[in-house]
Image (cartoon, grey):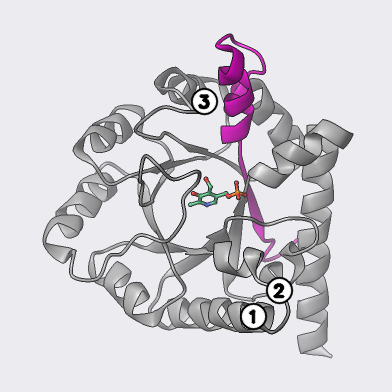
């Protein structure tokens, strides 16, 4: 399918369940293999500073055992830079990280950070790694991401996924405008966080968005119908929304 929206399956929470008992089951690398068979275009994993889910060994095994592109989410620290340079994933998505947070609660603030972020991004880029910045859909952040040399941004869909009523339309507008601004600035645009079967459609329909990264819902839903089924249903919901949007535009 031309312009197929890519799906990056985030396997962090397979590791969360494994770590609850400290053993080897369930194995996130096995989940990544299954995700590949179910139609994922990439695997996403967040190596957190506290290693609460994905471990260093998971990253090593994902690189060795999985053919799909790996998108390594990480905080922009020197420790993580060295890990990325060692394992050389296809992509790195730079995210903010606070130990006390339950999940990545907001986008990275890159405004005014050029002095140290520009060389940081360059070191990853020079190693052949495609760098994306996880940011709020806000023009000033997008311009700053462009200025530090990132070719890709991932728009944080958390506010959209938590919004209801009038707030929902407003949050969706912010994403649409953010994706448009990203295109104006020559940035490839991804999106993710908190997406579900019910709320993925309007985001999948945004024409400039080329990739969605989805994890928690897919792993949670797998409890009821299996991981293969949850990924296939998400894939179908994304494709349907994209096809409807494209059809509506050309009609
Ligand atoms: N994209 C980024 C940058 C993230 O940090 C996360 C959460 O780790 C996701 C996407 C996926 O979010 P969720 O697990 O809510 O689908």
Q: Total label count?
A: 3
The residue positioned 76% from the left and 61% from the top of the image is: 238
The residue positioned 74% from the left and 55% from the top of the image is: 196
Judge the density around disc 1: few (<14), some (14-19), many (≥20) Cα neighbours within 10 Å: few
- In which quarter of the view is residue 81 placed? top left
Q: Which residue is labeled 1 in the image?
A: 167
Q: Identify the residue at the far right of this view.
A: 225
The residue positioned 24% from the left and 71% from the top of the image is: 111
Q: Identify the residue at the far top of this view.
A: 23
Q: Which residue is labeled 2 in the image?
A: 164
Give the distance between the C-alpha atoms of the residues marked 3 and 2, in whole angstroms: 37 Å
Q: Nearer the viewer, mark 3 or mark 2?
A: 2
In the displayed structure, 92 sits above or below 53; it is: below
Q: Does the magenta stretch include residue 86?
A: no
Give the distance between the C-alpha atoms of the residues marked 2 and 1, in whole angstroms: 6 Å
- What range is drawn magenta here? 1-29
From the top left corner, tell me how far across and down residue 206 is, in percent: 65, 75
Residue 157 at least partly seen? no
The residue positioned 50% from the left and 19% from the top of the image is: 61
Q: Which of 217 and 209 is in front in this view?
A: 217
At mark 1, the secondary structure is helix
Quarter of the figure with the N terminus: bottom right
Q: Is residue 24 magenta?
A: yes
**Marks 2 and 1 in Cβ contact (< 8 Å):** yes
Say whether mark 1 is within 8 Å of ligand 1: no
From the top left corner, tell me how far across and down residue 38 is, in percent: 78, 38
């Amino acid at each position: 399918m031309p312009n197929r929206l890519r799906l990056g399956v985030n396997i962090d929470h397979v590791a969360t369940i494994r770590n609850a008992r400290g053993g080897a089951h369930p194995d996130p690398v096995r989940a990544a293999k299954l995700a590949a068979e179910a139609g994922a275009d990439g695997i996403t994993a967040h190596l957190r500073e506290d290693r609460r889910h994905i471990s260093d060994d998971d990253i090593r095994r994902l690189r060795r055992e999985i053919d799909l592109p790996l998108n390594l989410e990480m905080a922009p620290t020197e420790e993580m830079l060295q890990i990325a340079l060692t394992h050389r994933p296809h992509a790195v998505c730079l995210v903010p990280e606070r130990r006390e947070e339950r999940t990545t609660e907001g986008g990275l603030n890159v405004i005014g950070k050029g002095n140290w972020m520009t060389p940081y991004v360059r070191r990853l880029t020079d190693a052949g790694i495609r760098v994306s910045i996880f940011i709020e859909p806000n023009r000033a952040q997008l311009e700053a991401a462009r200025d530090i040399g990132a070719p890709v941004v991932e728009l944080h869909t958390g506010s959209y996924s938590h919004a209801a009523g009038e707030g929902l339309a407003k949050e969706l507008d912010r994403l649409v405008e953010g994706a448009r601004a990203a295109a104006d600035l020559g940035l490839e645009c991804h999106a993710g966080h908190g997406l579900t079967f019910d709320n993925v459609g309007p985001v999948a329909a945004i024409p400039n968005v080329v990739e969605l990264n989805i994890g928690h819902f897919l792993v949670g839903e797998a409890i009821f119908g299996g991981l293969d089924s949850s990924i296939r249903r998400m894939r179908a919901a994304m494709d349907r929304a994209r096809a409807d949007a494209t059809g509506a535009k050309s009609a």
